[in-house]
Amino acid sequence: MYAKIENDLVVEYPLYEGDLQNRFPELSFPLDTHGVSVPTGYVRVQQNIFTLNPDFVYQEVTPVKSGDVYVQNWQSRASTSEERASIMSQQAMNGAMAWIDELMGIANAYRAANAASISQEELLTLVLYMGELGQLDQMPDFPDNIIWPPPPSVLL
């Protein structure tokens, strides 16, 4: 991300590389890979990566200058019980979806690696298993109460 700077103050943020491409079509993008630096009056803003805590709600605000660089800046406030429940639910959803993706990837990798030798019965059990995985997020209590389908014996 980038920001437009005037007199060491951020006057426009956030700006993305596409925004700069529109403003400076004569430059080669991505910047810095072709010996082209960020245009005068603009700065790259370093991301401020931190672990989210469900006890707080975060909002990005104007970047701050730290030494010679500008860094993302966040404000936080205590979250309400409703916001905490929503955050926890979203984290559970993300975790469950990541696990489903992982299991689907394992099944797909097995199917691809054994395409020439897999039997029709094994293929059918894999396809059915993947279909069940694909429908888990439609369960009424998802992600709080997941009934995981047993993996086919070829994956054990």
Image (cartoon, rainbow, N blue to C red):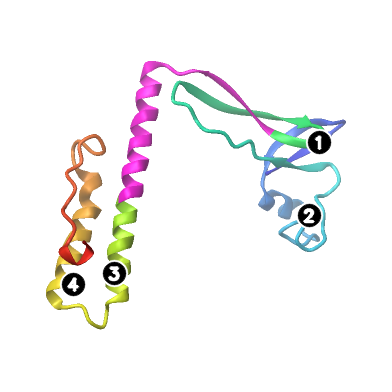
**Residue underneath mark 4:** 123
**Residue underneath mark 1:** 5
Q: Residue at x 30, y 51 (%)?
A: 100
**Residue 77 falls inside the magenta stretch:** yes
Q: CA distance from mark 1 to mark 3?
A: 53 Å
Residue 55, compared with residue 100, is above or below; it is above
With 12 as the anchor, is 142 left or right in this view? Answer: left
Viewer-side label of 3, 4: 3
**Residue underneath mark 2:** 24
Which residues are the magenta region? 72-99
- Label 2: element kind: loop
Q: CA distance from mark 2 to mark 1?
A: 16 Å
Residue at far bottom of view: 116
Q: Residue at x 24, y 34 (%)?
A: 144
Local packing at callout 2 (Cα closer than 10 Å; few below 14, some 14-19, many 20+) is few
> Of the residues under marks 1 and 4, which one precedes in the sequence?
1
Q: Which mark is residue 110?
A: 3
Q: Residue at x 52, y 33 (%)?
A: 51
Residue 9, compared with residue 114, is above or below; it is above
Whether pointer 1 and pointer 3 mark residues with C-beta atoms closer than 8 Å, the reply is no
Q: Residue at x 82, y 53 (%)?
A: 37
Amino acid type of the residue tagged 3 in the rendering: Tyr
